[in-house]
Amino acid sequence: MTSIHADIDALKGLREALVRYRHAQREVAGRGEEEIKVVRASLEAKASRWRAQLEQCQAEFGACQERAAQAAADGPAIGDDPVDCSGYARAVEQCGERLEQIRRWQQRIDAEASEFQGIASRFGDLLENDLPRTEEHLLALIRGLEGARRVQAPGA
Amino acid sequence: MVTRPDRDGDQQLRLLDDVWDKASQHWHDGMARQFEGGHWTPLLRESRGYLEALRKLMDMLEAAERDTEG
């Protein structure tokens, strides 16, 4: 490579790097979108499991309360322990808390993802429209320089 | 091992920046300055803004998964 063509070679290298960058960042953006979908689906599946668990805990707590009410109506029986539903009540509370925790994450992610979409859309526009124009611009510069060198070459 | 997309994106930007550094050693006329202001600087700005937002979101997604395990 002669130094007189170093700028042309540098521009060619830059243009090729821009093409690679456009493809690589398009893939990065696609993976980012996919990750959002995966985590949203995962949180929804967890919420669904905890909703089912909450329903079961509520049913068990309700059944315990019925037993306690029945025992109270029947009066104290010798040797019977009083019906204690506090464990079921705690389980209902814990299931509710887990479900609420997941809902809060879902809301935070919805808000963050919504804000992100605007930025991602602008970046997508840069990849699809601006960068190809930049590459074309560089190509025109390269051709211009090559043409000028060819013209200059005989007298150089 | 699968890496996070934001980290791969950062790596790609660093690679491109290296190529620009090399190119600008050989190309520093008026057209180069025009290109830098009109194309290169906006490209860097948009890329960094996007990758920072992606990093923030990926951090949040990881935290959500961790916090809701079990």
Image (spheres, coloured by chain):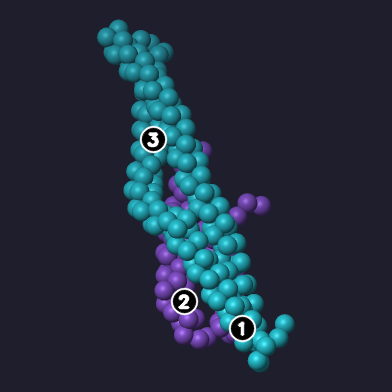
**Which chain is represented by cyan in the image?**
A
In which image quadrant can residue A119 be found? bottom left
Residue at image coords 61%, 72%: A12
Question: Residue A99 got which mark?
Answer: 3
Q: Quadrant of the N terminus of chain A?
A: bottom right
Question: Does label 3 or label 1 sit earlier along the sequence?
Answer: 3
- Residue A88 placement (x, y as % from top left): 39, 25
Residue with the mark numbered 2? B35
Q: Which amino acid does label 3 sit on?
A: Leu
Q: Which chain carries label 3?
A: A
Q: Please, what secondary structure does the residue beneath circle 2 have?
A: helix
- Residue furthest toward the right? A1
B47 to B30, vertically: above or below: above
Q: Which amino acid does label 2 sit on?
A: Phe
Q: Which class describes the residues within 10 Å of circle 3: few (<14), some (14-19), or many (20+)?
A: many
- Residue A116 placement (x, y as % from top left): 39, 53
Q: Are marks 3 and 1 on the same chain?
A: yes
Q: Which class describes the residues within 10 Å of circle 1: few (<14), some (14-19), or many (20+)?
A: few
Q: Which class describes the residues within 10 Å of circle 2: few (<14), some (14-19), or many (20+)?
A: some
- Residue A55 placement (x, y as % from top left): 38, 23
Question: Residue A151 got which mark?
Answer: 1
Residue at image coords 45%, 71%: B39
